[in-house]
Image (cartoon, rainbow, N blue to C red):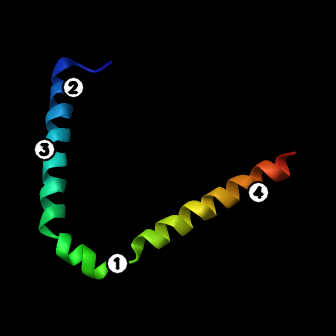
Amino acid sequence: MFSQGQLIFAACFFVAFAIAMIYAYRKDVKLHKLFYKGSYKILIAFIVFIGILFVIKVYFKR
């Protein structure tokens, strides 16, 4: 499906992207702690909301 060159490029790109993201996160970790202090609550609320929508869908499908 993919040529060997495409697979090598994808692997190299993934490694370089992961390294760049780790570097950028470590550089800004102090700012993240300051400005995004309660962001995990929003993530939990979003997951609960999606779960409720799923339960409603299953309930009304019957």
Q: Is residue 8 above or below residue 59?
A: above
The span from disc 1 to disc 2 (Cα, nearest Å) is 39 Å
Residue 5 location, x and y as percent?
A: 15, 23
Residue type, label 3: Ala
Dot 2: element = helix
Depth-wise, is mark 1 or mark 3 nearer the camera?
1
Which residue is rendered at x = 20% and y = 26% of the image?
6
Q: Could you say where residue 22 lies in the image, as x and y percent from the top left?
A: 17, 55
Q: Quadrant of residue 55?
A: bottom right
Residue position marked by numbered label 2 in the rendering: 7
Residue at the image point whose x is 12% and y is 58% from the top: 23
Is the C-beta separation of discs 3 and 2 under 8 Å?
no
Q: Quadrant of the C terminus?
A: top right
Determine the secondary structure under disc 4.
Answer: helix
In the rendered image, residue 8, in percent from the top left (x then y), is placed at: 15, 26
Give the CA distance from mark 4 to mark 3: 42 Å
Q: Which residue is mark 3?
A: 16
Residue beneath the point at 76% across and 57% down = 56
Which quadrant of the figure has residue 16?
top left
Upstream in sequence: badge 1 or badge 3: 3
Q: 10 Å neighbourhood of mark 2: few (<14), some, or many (≥20)?
A: few
- Give the mark nearest the N terminus, 2 or 4: 2
Label 2, label 4: how many angstroms apart (C-alpha)?
42 Å
| Residue at 55%, 68% in the rendered image | 45
How far apart in space, not on screen, are marks 1 and 4 (Cα)? Answer: 32 Å
Q: Which mark is residue 37?
A: 1
Q: Is residue 40 above or below residue 8?
A: below
Amino acid carrying mark 1 in the image: Lys
